[in-house]
Each structure stands twice: as C-alpha cells, then as structure tokens.
Amino acid sequence: MCGILGIIGNYEVVGDIYRGLLSLQHRGQDSAGIITYSDRFNIKKGNGLVSEIFKEKNLSYLKGNIGIGHVRYPTIGGGKAEDAQPFYVNIPSGIIMAHNGNVINYTQLKKELEEVNLRHLNSKSDVEAILNVFASKLEKRGKVNIDNIFASVKEVYKKVEGSYSVIAYIRNKGLLAFRDPVGFKPLIYGKKDANYAFASESVALDTLGYKRIRDVKAGEAIFIDTNGKEYSKILGNKKHRPCIFEWVYFARPDSVIDGISVYGARLRLGKELAKTVKKLRLPIDLIIPVPDTSRAAAITLSEELNIPYREGLIKNRYIGRTFIMPQQAMRKMSIRLKLNPIEGEIKGKNILIVDDSIVRGNTSRQIVQLIKEAGAKKIFFASYSPPLRHPCVYGIDMQTRSEFIAKNKSIKDIEKEIGTDKLIYQSYEGLIKGVSGGENMKFCTACFDGKYPTPVDEKILKKIETERKMDKENE
Ligand code: SF4
C-alpha cells in the first residue's frame, strides 16, 4: 500500500505535493519522495514521514511546475532508502515514475530487462521494473508522441503482472497516469483552473482545492501534455476488481473511491454487521470501536442494536498504524503505546469491541486484555469484515498463510486465543453489500475467499512467502 500524487500546472507545485502527501500519509509511513521538473529533475527522498524528510530548504530546492510525490509502505524489498520512489530513467527523454501496487513477476521482469534489454535495475523497488519496461518499449518506438506513449502502456499491461496505479512524467511531454487492467488500486484525477492532479485518494485533491473529475478507469491511461491538453484511452480489457480493503481499512473515510464514499461504506458495514449480532442476542451494555477506522461501523451498529456507543479506547495520534508497521516487535509495543482505555466507561459492563478486521489476532488479543484490565464483565469482539485467510499478492503485507489466525482455526479456537467471550465476523454477503451499497459492483476479495482476479498459483504464493520471510529476516 502506497500513496501517489502528481501535478502538472502553471505554478510551483512542490508546496501542493507536500501538502497532498501529508493527506496521503496514512497509506505509508516508511518512506517518502518528491521529484519535480524545472529545467532539470530535482529529487528528494528518504526513509521516514513526509514531515521528517522535507524541510524548508528541500522544498525551496524542488522547483518546477510539474512533480510527482510518493509515500511508501514496502512491498518487495526491505524498505531501504534507495527503494524510495519516485524513480528516474534517462532514456528516452527522461522519465520519472511512482506507483502504488505490487508487481508479481518482478524477478522475471528484472532478469529480462537486464539480459535482453540491457537495462539495469538499481533497487529492489518494483516500480523500477515498470518504469524500465515502459521506457524500453517507448525507446524502441522511436518518437515520443501520444500514440507511442499509449502503445507502450499497453505493452506494460502485457508484461507486468500484479497491481499498479502509476503516475509518470515524460520530460517536456506531459504527465501520464494509468491503472492496471484490473484496477486494483485507486487513482483519481482532478482539475483546478488549468492545472491537473492525479492522486491515490480524493482527499488529496480536496485538500489542494482541486475539483474531482473522475477515477481513472481500470486499464485506462490518461495523458496531460505540457499545453494542458488531455488524452485518454482504455488499453486493458479485464474486468474492474478494485481492492475491497480500501473501503474496509486503508483509505481515509473522507475519500471517495470509484464513486463509493469510504465513510458511507463503513457506515453500511456496521449496519450489515448488526444483522449477525442481533441474531445472537448477546447481553451487550456498550459498543466501543477500535479507533480510528472502526468508528463509523460502530456508530451504525449501535444505532441498529439500540445500544450506547462510547469512545472507550483513546488513541495516541502520534503513534503510527500498527497494521502497517513491518516488524512484529514494533507492532506489539505500539499497541500499548497507542491505545488507552477509559476505565469509568468500561468497568462492570459487557462490552462489544468493534474492529475492521483480524489478521494475526495479536492486536485483538491485546485490545481484549486492555478492556479486561479496565474492569469489563464480559467482552465480545466483532470484525466488520469476514475472516482473512489468504495472502494478498497485490501489495498488502498481510503475512504468509500460516500467520492468519483464521486460516486453520475454528471460531471457538480464535475466541480462546484472543480471550473474548464471543467473536462475531461480518458475513461475506454483508461485506459486499456494505461496501457496494447495493450497486452492481465487483471487487477483489481474494484475501477473504482466495479468488484472485489474476492468475495466482501455488508457485507464486510460495515465492511471495519466501520473499517476505527473507525480508523479515533482513529487517
Ligand atoms: S487480496 Fe485483499 S487486500 Fe489484496 S487487493 Fe485483494 S482485496 Fe485487497
């Protein structure tokens, strides 16, 4: 999971890219980078938060009316500074690129690029592979014009497997954005006067005062040339299957992705969950969300069940999201630092805790323990998404199969392991209905049902598991 933002305009864009990246910071806290173009490419990237990497002197150095920014959570690679995006290639013309996603056939592409195309990949970042595939195809076509740019994107679709929403700038030509043929990762664009911006989430456009135009479609490329002329073309031919986890957890609630409000989806997910909870007739006194993601679902759950909602867990805003912290030890430590219960609200009551999902179960166990220590009588735990059982091969670090708590365990066993009196999961139907709002829309739900929208066999799963294991050992 990463956040990307690109602007082509008639003003110095670095301030807006910086502010836009701040609004996308939730999508990755591992590294950040900005490249702008004036009469040269100006580059600043590194490991850390946006506010840590960019200081006043860097911002004044990043001159130009065109730029791309990126915040990263690592996919392939151990999260080293040299893997921070955007990336740059010289030939042809000078191109910079950033992406959000995960390239499944990275190793094969790297080999081919180095042995056949005589290009060298200098990092472990998979966007470097996409960039070099694109650049080598464009180079072969000779002239850098719109037909050849779109034809080269089409070649990327043929060669690159996995998920990728991409923003690139081709020197003195224009800003290019494309979404892989399945459209896993979000990408939206907007306009302010004669200026265009592409971003992972609409919140970045809102923050910068850009009017949303629309989402980039699955398999679509959009190009804005340096004169502000817009070109677009559908180049892929697969069915759109956006990642459902964007609405469940990743995206900010004030974003709208593919026409669906994230906050609206979470409110509906709470309503759907209420259907299951109602049937159980549990003696619940109070509903408490795990902040921040679960608030919306907990509110509608409380309304549907007519049971009070309270903020019983208070979050320290200055600790990062535990789900996207790479190391287990950091996760363990940070939950204690991150959440503190309000004892007066909890003591002597039967509490229903609401969370967005359960991955390994460690966070859930610690939250149950916190609530127990605050004096709750009974503790029930509800996840407004179904059991997670399958690894994501599209860029979400959900660990290897054996690490999913729900992989081979019964609900009773999970209840025991996390220490709750009752565990309730959202149904699969509830998940789809909640997110889609009844619209006829299909999603990638592979981490719940194992049905991957692109060919994924045992070999790929094993390979990804091995890579993740190696990455962890190197952490
Ligand atoms: S497998 Fe899950 S997390 Fe990964 S893209 Fe699909 S829905 Fe999203």
Image (cartoon, grey):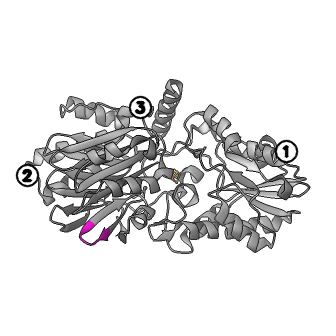
Q: What amino acid type should be assigned to the residue bearing mark 1?
A: Glu
Report x, y in % for residue 466. Answer: 50, 30
Mark 2 surroundings within 10 Å by alpha-carbon count, few (fewer than 14), some (14 through 19), many (20 or more) = few
Report x, y in % for residue 172. Answer: 14, 54
Q: Residue furthest left?
A: 143
Q: Earlier in the sequence, mark 3 or mark 2?
A: 3
Q: Magenta-highlighted stretch: main secondary structure?
A: strand
Magenta-drawn stretch contains 1: no
Circles 3 and 1 in contact, beta carbons < 8 Å: no
Residue 297, numbered circle: none
Q: Residue furthest front?
A: 56
Residue at 63% x, 38% y: name it. Answer: 331
- Please identify, in this view, whether the residue under mark 3 or under mark 2 is nearer the observer: 3
Residue at 15% x, 60% y: name it. Answer: 146
Magenta-drawn stretch contains 193: yes
Q: Magenta stretch: give its range.
A: 191-195
- According to the picture, the residue beneath numbered tag 2 turns out to be 143
Q: What amino acid type should be assigned to the residue bearing mark 2?
A: Lys
Residue at 77% x, 43% y: name it. Answer: 418
151 left or right, relative to 184? left
Please tell me in which quadrant of the rendered image residue 15 appears.
bottom left
| Inter-mark Cα distance, 3 to 1 | 39 Å
Residue 80, numbered circle: 3
Report x, y in % for residue 213. Answer: 34, 72
Res 472 seen here: yes
CB of residue at label 1: within 8 Å of ligand 1?
no
Q: How many tags in the picture?
A: 3
